[in-house]
Amino acid sequence: MSASTTVRPKTQRGGSSGPPQKRGSRFARWDLKYSPYVYILPFFVLFAIVGVFPLGYTAWVSLNDWSLIGGQGDFVGIDNFTSILGEKEFWVALRNTISIFLIQVIPQLIFGLIIAAALDRNLRNATFWRMGVLLPYIVMPVAVALIFGSLFADRYGLVNTTLESIGLPAIGWHTDIIPSHIAIATMVDFRWTGYTSLILLAGMQAIPRDYYEAATIDGAGAARQFFSITIPQLRSTLIFVVITATIGGLQIFDEPRLFDQAGTGGPDNQWLTLTLYLYKLGWTDLDFGKAAAVAWLLFLLIIIVAVVNLVISSRVSKSEGRK
């Protein structure tokens, strides 16, 4: 061998040397280990900016004497909370909020189940009907409130006119407590029942069809299959729907705000909700400290009701699973 001959290092199969392959394998391990966190990081960053920070900042505002014009004032601790809890208007708003929520959530679940069961059948043009039930959901809440506010008008509304034409007395939709709650709950159900039915429909389509075929062979009718197969298999979906309906139902604002022209919750606070009360404190009385306190009380109420729903639903599902 001559002196000018160059001795090349041995290479691994494929022509790549050892150190680059080690660096590549190390990078592959890092990518496998950390890339999932990188992919979900934007969500948590956005959630921290638009969710966690406003929640914490609202808590700080609620502990201060804060006004729109003067800004942050003296630190008052829990005085805003004790002042709110001592006002009759707060308890009226809490009563109205819970009443409207209970009136609207039960029919929404019942009609949502019925519509979902109908859409789960082999319908012709199924896509058309499924998109059709979603149309009320995409209608602007302002338009829905204005239309239903006219329907439930006390003097010339279509509902009272129809009742009087058949010899029944007119109902004070804007003067009585329960009728006003029913009218507002009807608006909410009109918008959200289609959305709820599509979620329930997705849960129904995930149920194995073998269950229904076996039940049909055993002689079970459609009603027996619905209550013995569909409802138990929809347990987790129903829990999700109830929790989301709770969160949305306790925060209704557009419908009671636009139920009349004044938008104050009624002359005697017949349909004043917690969100309307919060709006009044913040943008009419310009007292941001008390408004923030109401916001936190509403947040705690939603958490409590959601946890109670989850606990009850979990216990029901466990007791049914043991049978």
Image (cartoon, grey):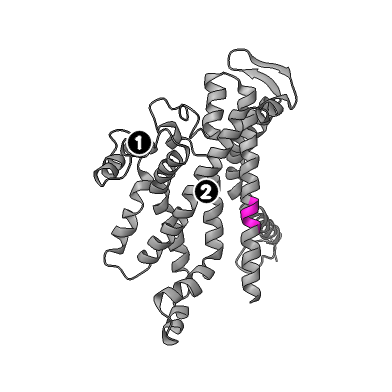
Q: Secondary structure of the magenta portion, mostly? A: helix
Q: Quadrant of residue 180?
A: top left
Q: Quadrant of residue 232?
A: bottom right
The residue indicated by pointer 1 is 149
Give how far apart the Cα atoms at labels 1 and 2 are. 20 Å
Residue at point 49%, 28% (across, down): 268
Query: Does label 1 or label 2 sit earlier along the sequence?
Result: 2
**Please, what secondary structure does the residue beneath circle 1 have?**
helix
Residue 290, above or below 244? above
Amino acid carrying label 1: it is: Gly
Q: Residues within 10 Å of mark 1 (few under 14, many from 20)?
A: many
**Please, what secondary structure does the residue beneath circle 2 have?**
helix
Q: Position of residue 129 (x, y in %)?
A: 30, 59
Q: Position of residue 69 (x, y in %)?
A: 58, 13
Residue 158, above or below 261? below
Residue 222, above or below 30? below
Residue at point 47%, 79% (across, down): 211
Residue at point 50%, 43% (across, down): 100
The residue indicated by pointer 2 is 102
Q: Where are the magenta residues, as a range?
A: 307-311
Q: Residues within 10 Å of mark 2 (few under 14, many from 20)?
A: some
Amino acid carrying label 2: it is: Leu
In this rendering, position of residue 241 left or right of residue 130: right
The quarter in which the C terminus is drawn is bottom right
